[in-house]
Image (cartoon, rainbow, N blue to C red):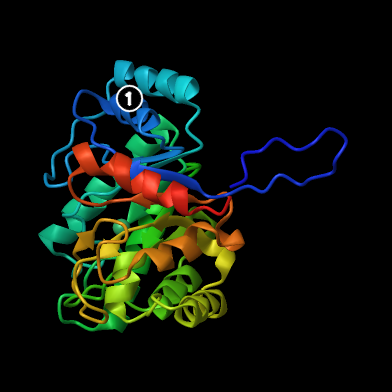
Amino acid sequence: MNNTPPLLGEQIATPIGPYLGAHMPTAGGHACALTAGHGIGCEAVQIFTASPRQWRAPELKEETILAWRQALAECGTKKTIAHDSYLINLAAPPGSEVLAKSRAAFRAEIERAEALGLDFLVSHPGAHGGDGEDVGIARLIESLDILHAETAGAKVRVALETTAGQGTYLGGRFEHLTRILNGVKDPERLAVCLDTCHIFAAGYDIRTPAGYEETMAQFDRIIGLPWLQVVHANDSAKPFGSHADRHAHIGEGEIGLEAFRRLVNDPRLAGLPIIVETPDSETMHEVNVRRLRELIAA
Ligand SMILES: [Zn+2]
């Protein structure tokens, strides 16, 4: 983005770029994610509101919520996002223990995100476990309808994430997301999160200018660009079409730097959070966020 102030009297529409940020650790408290993120140049921050590998999650303490709101005001973070637990599968078979636990855990995810006043809760659409895409999508829709009803009035939007389409995971095709959006009773409670590593592994080739344009055109044609509200910027350690989900540092994987240059300069993504979820957060998040920022055309 051009940081030069406009000349006096000149009519220049200030271009709004994307809000760059990272998935920040919450060790030391949720608010630390905001202050540490601010310290490394994040305008958007994503967190886990509880441990992503445990079913049991304590309710947020009042002091945690107050500290979060204070840090948010101080840091001026533009977009705040939670990512849900890895254990949750809202497309699990009816009557299964996993489905019951997943729905209870996801309801708590929504409640924690709402208590913190977050903009989005990013969620993987789940896995059908061998019962087929149609069945899996129908189960997910039923779960979402139940959860939306249980959390009526919540403002946080659930952003369904594109996946690498590994195993029986849903979300490897844009069509899956369209069917979910079309199927739920309250689609306005939902949004879509596009992960560059996942779509690349799922078979959307964003490496070339033509491939990037075709992918965005497909997203618009199949899902509709207004649904795109969160972007995850991760390079891929695994090859194109591998259906394997392994994130790499920006410009150091199979996707390469030029695709990320197109991404951060894409006017269709103006005002959206672009979040890195790359390894070695302590040392590399700052580097990856800076890499993205340096790609924004001056
Ligand atoms: Zn992601």
Q: On the image, which quarter does residue 224 sit in?
A: bottom right
Q: In which quarter of the image is ligand 1?
A: bottom left
Q: In this view, does 99 lie above or below 218?
A: above
- Decide if residue 108 is in sight here: no
Residue 256 seen in the figure: yes
Task: Give neighbour class at mark 1: few <14, some 14-19, many 20+ (Cα, 10 Å).
Answer: many
Q: Residue drawn at (31%, 57%), measured in percent from left and top?
A: 250
* Residue sitting farthest toward the right: 9
State the count of labels.
1
Q: In this view, does 282 lie to the left or right of 118?
A: left
Q: Nearer the viewer, residue 151 or 45?
A: 45
In percent of width and height, residue 79 lies at 48, 40
Give how far across and how far down residue 109 sits, in percent.
30, 43
In front of the other: 202 or 98: 202
- The residue that appears at 84% across and 43% down in the rendered structure is 11
Q: From the viewer's perspective, tell me whether residue 238 is left or right of residue 266.
A: left
In the rendered image, the vertical position of residue 231 relative to residue 166, given as above or below: above
Q: Nearest the camera: 143 or 217?
A: 217
Above or below 161: residue 26: above
The amino acid marked with disc number 1 is: Ala
Q: Considering the numbered disc 1 on the image, is that residue within a helix, a strand or a loop?
A: helix
Residue 135 location, x and y as percent? 28, 80
Q: Does the residue labelled 1 lie within 8 Å of ligand 1?
A: no
Q: Residue shown at 51%/61% (left/top)?
A: 228
Q: Residue 140: horizontal and vertical position, in percent?
A: 32, 67
Q: Circle 1 sits on which residue?
A: 31
Relative placement, left or right, of 87 versus 136 is: left
